[in-house]
Image: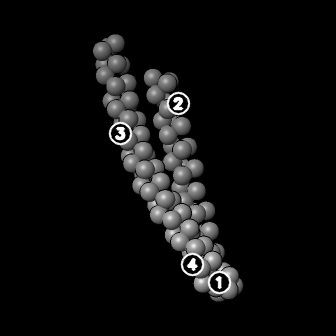
Amino acid sequence: EKYEKLKKEAVIFEAHLKNARKSLNSFAQLKEKLIVINKQNNTLRRIIKEHKMDPKVLLKEKIDADATLLSAGDVAREEMNILENINTASRDL
């Protein structure tokens, strides 16, 4: 009976680890996307400066970029919550 209980807990723990790995992979992919977005923003700032472009022309682009960053931030928060829940569950085992 004790063996069965340990076996059941091991299966649950293994599932938590699998989910944690998926979350970490998603988080790593998100981090890469954020790095690309940041580089694009820096490039855009440099172009505006070099060409003395009217910022109003690029306002829509900035709004789109901001929306993308907000969306990415929401995903990151969700991933962190998942990791926190997994961490809590693994401590409970």
**Along the viewing direction, whichever of 41 and 27 lies nearer the viewer:** 41
State the image quarter where residue 84 is shown. Answer: top right
Give the structural element (helix, strand or loop) at label 2.
Answer: helix
Rendered location of residue 2, percent (x, y): 34, 12
Q: Which mark is residue 47?
A: 4
Circle 4: is it few (<14), some (14-19), or many (20+) Cα within 10 Å? few
Give the Cα separation between the discs numbered 4 and 3. Answer: 44 Å
Give the Cα separation between the discs numbered 2 and 1. Answer: 52 Å
| Pointer 3 residue | 18
| Pointer 2 residue | 88
Identified at 51% across, 69% down, the residue is: 40
Give the structural element (helix, strand or loop) at label 1.
Answer: loop
Whichever of labels 4 and 1 marks the residue nearer the N terminus, that label is 4
Whichever of labels 2 and 3 marks the residue nearer the N terminus, that label is 3
Above or below, 12 relative to 71? above
Identified at 51% across, 59% down, the residue is: 34
Circle 1: is it few (<14), some (14-19), or many (20+) Cα within 10 Å? few
| Pointer 1 residue | 52
Whichever of labels 2 and 4 marks the residue nearer the N terminus, that label is 4
